[in-house]
Image (spheres, helix red, strand yellow):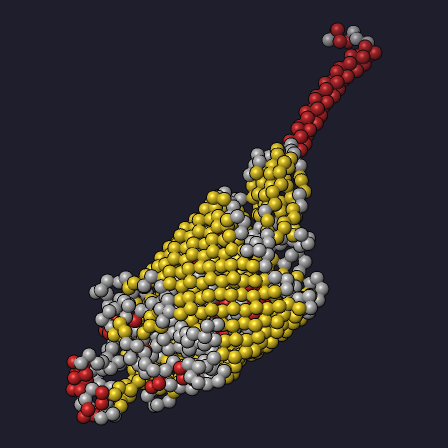
Amino acid sequence: MERIASHSPARHRTICTRGVSRLLCRIAGIGALLLILICGLCTRAASAQTAGPGQIEGTVTNAKGGAIAQAIISVIGPTNRSEMSDAQGRYLISGLAPGAYSIEVARPGYVPNRLKSVEVKSGGSIEIPVVLVAAPNETVIVTASRIEADLASAPAAVSVVRADQIAAAASSNIGDLLRAVPGLNVVQTTAREFNLASRQASPTLTNSQIALVDGRSIYSDFYNVVFWDLIPVNTSDIKQIEVVRGPVSAVWGANAATGAVNIITKTPREAAGLSFTLSGGGFSRDAGSTAGSGVGGFGGASVAFSQAVNDRWAYRISTGYSFSDAFPRPTGTVAVARSPIDSTMVVGGGSYDAVSYRNPGTRQPKFDLRVDQDLRGGAKITYEGGFAASQGIIHTITGPFRLEPGSYAGYGRFSLDKGSLRLSAFANYLNGEAPALLTRNPEGNPLRIDFRTGSYDLTGGYTQLVASRHLLNYGLNVRHSTFDISLAPNAKGRTEVGGYFEDEILLGKFRVPLGLRLDKFSNISSVIFSPRMALVFKPIGDHSVRFSFNRANRSPSAIDNYVDIRLVGGYFPLGAINPLFGNQMFPIVTHSFGNTQLKAESLTAWEIGYAGTFASHTNVGLAVYLNDSNHVINNLMSPSALIAAGLQPFYTSQNPPPGWPLPPSVLVLLAQQGIYLPANVQMLNFGKLRNKGLEFSVTQPINRMLGAFANYSYQSVPESRSPMSDPYRYPGGLLPVPPRNRVNAGINLHGKRYLGDFSINHAGKAYWADALDPTYYGYTGSYTMVNTSFGVRWAEGKVTTSVKAINLLNDSIQQHIFGDILKRRIFGELQFGF
């Protein structure tokens, strides 16, 4: 205390000042240290942020500056990544470690663009615009997977008929254009009707091959058929026709079991201007029922106008009309023969003269309107609608029907395409009246097929690239169909819901498409599964080897489920058995009805394929396939199957035909002679069938104007694979057999001034078992059809004149056992384009 008390006030202030200064100095030092630490941390954070991963971005465009969507941009370097361009062509690849990168940009239909030595710096962003140049010789397809792909990468066998081939071909309908496709059986039965089937015999009404126009299904659900003459598209409006040979149910749904044909039309901007086509000519009728008659006439006219109003709107309006006189009918009798599968079954002997009828020609008007709207951001909307009418003969297993004038198909469609996103909605309407020409009901009146149906479909799809290797393609569609069918008065509306998912795994030289589709039909209790697996190996750029597995399905049609008719299948001449009855004839009534318990028809397909290009010119294709069908839907007269289903196949003495005027014991006598009178026929699921074969094709450009092609198809005799003890085994004698060998070859010319085509189509003999009754089953002979055309362009290509000939050698060709006779057709064509 004393010591403190002895300090003076001044000294006390000095001591206090020094203490405060030291404290302040310490505080300041600590603050400075903290500030240095904070600044250091901030600097490090900023440094760390600056030193982060870099990125590459840009826009992919074509030579005209248009955005290219769905191009795959791959970078290779310290980090390997891939991304896909959006609807505006923009792409962004982030998270790249610093270093040197090479970049590859690829899109089907364009030459890949490869950029090297791109340096990515820490935290930097590099803008790299990419221009892709169209590949002049590459064909882009969309039908195999519902997204664009080149032929070599497709997971299925695909053939394409291009616009230049269509312009030069000697053809009067779409069937003529597709006749040279390998593996495709095209059969023309009348002036209005043709049918086609992939890798199987082509029956009178093919039911497992779908058809599309710009992705819109024109498959008629009420009977599971395609009316090819009711397509409202002029030939000059077609950009290309894609044919998938083999199942595509994994993406297009049930009913695309054996293949698909997709007619892709030109956009209004691709064919701007006015075009007018006039054609006319004649065909020989010196055969069969019209032997010695004069020349028959056929021809048509079409007009199309397309205009791009501005950079947002474009439209096309087109209309057409075609006509043809009737073709000759065969005369005489069907040659007696044995089935190629069941040698115990004797067929043939029926007289064409006994079932003669007036054979009308056909008249076919059509109209179509399309409007395209280009939106900002790269999206595109299409509005379209149209109709087509027809008349003429329809051949069915119960005989020919006459499609009356006024029968038509109409549609309306809306679609949105925004890069990876695709939306569409359409409505199809089909109205027709068709009385039978031969078949009668018990009252003696012609059996009729009158139908009014509507289908309403909503579909959405999306494509994206995930984890640089997985190209995902998935979608959903809902369809509702309404039916008003005279043959199936109890047919109900049907709703279908389906979804598909496909992952195409990109592994360098390997592509592995894995797909699955699920479909639920309101007329089938179970869900339909349609898987697809493929392995595509591309050892070098223009060569690929394909291994694929498919499971496809065909759903029962409204007719399959609900048909309910009683018909007189013919008259039984008892006088031919016992002279006591003279020439008196008795009608035999058969009840044909559907089956609501039918399962979906299934097809399991295996295929090995190859596609390659040699010397940048010669294209070679090879496919070997094996197709196993099961639960095949048909209404065959199979006694064992009908008995197993609890039905009586034939009339007996205990159950004679209605109005039977003779003692029931007569039926016993007839049965002892092997003659049975049919009582009931029902739609049933039959057993296993096998089809197998191979296809080989080669195309060779000769120069800028000339090209040549050749292909060969082999189809083995179909096999019934179910055990002999199976009551639902498909009867071998009722199984049609396609031509075992088919050869197509030709040369096409497409120059600035001249165009033309010369082709040879050869098909071996075929066996048919789908006409009236077994007395009209039998063989059609092999034939060779020679077609040719030559045209000249005038006035700088604005006018084209052509002369075309189909069946130049004038052979009498009958492509179906009950079909018309095809003779030489020669016609001229005049086309204007402004």
Does residue 331 appear left or right of residue 227 in this picture?
A: left
Residue 269 coordinates in the image, percent (x, y)? 65, 64
Viewer-closest of 216 and 822:
822
Q: Residue at x 55, y 75 (%)?
A: 827
Picture quarter with the N terminus: top right
Residue 239 can be seen, yes or no: no
Picture quarter with the C terminus: bottom right
Residue 632 coordinates in the image, percent (x, y)? 33, 67
Q: Is residue 680 above or below residue 42?
A: below
Q: Is residue 743 above or below residue 668?
A: above
Residue 291 can be seen, yes or no: yes
Q: How many marks?
A: 0
Residue 431 coordinates in the image, percent (x, y)? 49, 79
Q: Residue at x 18, y 92 (%)?
A: 580
Does residue 95 appear left or right of residue 781 in this picture?
A: right
Q: Is residue 293 above or below residue 809?
A: below
Residue 80 coordinates in the image, percent (x, y)? 55, 39
Q: Residue at x 16, y 84 (%)?
A: 669
Viewer-closest of 367 and 385:
367
Does residue 271 appear left or right of residue 332 in this picture?
A: right
Q: Is residue 589 above or below residue 111?
A: below
Q: Residue at x 68, y 42 (%)?
A: 127
Pick out the residue farthest to the right. 10
